[in-house]
């Protein structure tokens, strides 16, 4: 039975972040807090601790129920934490995502975006979350 696991590894394994690199970057930039204090990616997480994660402009809160070292399926991952995020924050999250998943539209015959156009598109999209 695992007693402690790195916080970046746990955040990735329970599918809060898509990659471990993203989880590590969030920890390094101060977007992951435990009991109100910023933590490094190497912080050893224990059962029962409270995590606050700022992800894409949303403030999410979780209580650690079980520890994982490897990425598992979504049903198993959801059983490893309790979502303590306030209803107000969850409504903000749901309002933002519901109905927003339309594909981007480019004019016919224009082709794929160039590197410069792609950078401009990414910059434009990321401004919404900061």
Image: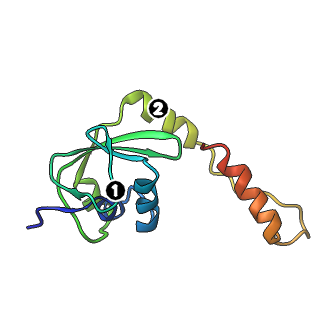
Q: Which residue is mark 1?
A: 40
Q: Quadrant of residue 103?
A: bottom right
Q: Which residue position is annotated with label 2?
A: 91
Asked whether residue 104 is in view, the answer is: no
Q: Secondary structure at mark 1?
A: loop
What sort of colour scheme is used for the picture? Answer: rainbow
123 in relation to 63, above or below:
below
Q: Is residue 126 above or below residue 7?
A: above
Q: Position of residue 37 (x, y in %)?
A: 31, 41
- Residue 60: x and y in percent read 39, 41
Side of 128 where 9 appears, left or right: left
Residue at (79, 57) in percent of width and height: 105
Q: Which SS class for mark 2?
A: helix
The residue positioned 76% from the left and 64% from the top of the image is 118
In the rendered view of the protein, which quadrant contains the N terminus? bottom left
Badge nearest the viewer, 1 or 2: 1
Upstream in sequence: badge 1 or badge 2: 1
Relative to 33, does residue 2 appear above or below in the rendering?
Answer: below
Q: Residue furthest right?
A: 109
Q: Quadrant of residue 112?
A: bottom right
């Amino acid at each position: 039975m695992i007693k402690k696991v790195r916080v970046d590894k746990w955040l990735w394994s329970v599918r809060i972040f898509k990659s471990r690199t993203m989880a590590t970057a969030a920890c390094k930039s101060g977007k992951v807090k435990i009991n109100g204090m910023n933590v490094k990616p190497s912080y050893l997480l224990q059962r029962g601790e409270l995590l606050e994660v700022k992800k894409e402009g949303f403030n999410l809160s979780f209580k650690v129920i079980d520890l994982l070292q490897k990425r598992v399926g979504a049903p198993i991952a959801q059983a490893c934490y309790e979502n303590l995020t306030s209803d107000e924050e969850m409504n903000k999250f749901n309002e933002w995502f519901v109905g927003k998943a339309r594909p981007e539209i480019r004019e016919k015959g224009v082709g794929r975006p160039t590197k410069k156009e792609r950078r401009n598109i990414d910059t434009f999209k990321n401004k919404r979350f900061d």
